[in-house]
Amino acid sequence: MPNKKLKISTKKYQGETSVISLRLPIELVATLDEIAKVTGRTRNDIMQRCLEFSVDNLEITEGEQK
C-alpha cells in the first residue's frame, strides 16, 4: 500500500449519524485532542475522518486464526 496522508479539509460532514461507544488508550485520545486543537475541528470529526480514511484504504489479507 502506498504511503498516504490523511488530508483534513474545511468541509463538515452533514447527514444521518449513529452514536457508538469506543475505548481508546489515553495517549491516543491526547493525540486526537491535539490534532483537534491544531485543526479547529472536534475530536469526533477527526476520529470520523481517520476511520473513513482507514476503511477506504484497507487491505484485507489471509492470516492466522487465533
Image (spheres, rainbow, N blue to C red):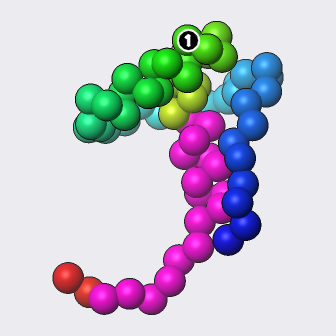
Q: Is residue 39 above or below residue 47?
A: above
Left or right of 56, for residue 36: left
Query: To which quarter of the image does residue 42 belong?
Result: top right
x and y percentages locating residue 16 in the rendered image: 61, 31
Residue 18 visible, this angle: yes
Q: Amino acid at mark 1?
A: Lys
Q: Is residue 20 above or below residue 31?
A: below
At x 66% / y 16%, what residue is drawn? 39
Query: To which quarter of the image does residue 36 belong?
Result: top right
Q: Is residue 54 above or below residue 33?
A: below
- Answer whether residue 42 is magenta in the image: no
Residue 21 visible, this angle: no
Q: Nearer the viewer, residue 60 or 36?
A: 36
Left or right of 9, for residue 29: left
Stretch in magenta = 48-64
The residue singled out by tag 1 in the image is 37
Q: Nearer the viewer, residue 64 or 44?
A: 64
x and y percentages locating residue 28 in the rendered image: 37, 34
Label 1 CA crowd tier, 10 Å (few <14, some 14–19, many 20+) = few
Left or right of 9, for residue 58: left
SS at mark 1 in the image: helix
At x 72% / y 54%, what residue is drawn? 4
- Answer whether residue 50 is magenta in the image: yes
At x 73% / y 66%, what residue is drawn? 2
x and y percentages locating residue 53 in the rendered image: 64, 49
At x 27% / y 29%, what residue is drawn? 26
Query: To which quarter of the image does residue 46 belong?
Result: top right
Q: Residue furthest left?
A: 66
Q: Quadrant of the N terminus?
A: bottom right
Q: Nearer the viewer, residue 48 or 36?
A: 36
Q: Quadrant of the C terminus?
A: bottom left
Q: Is residue 65 above or below residue 54?
A: below
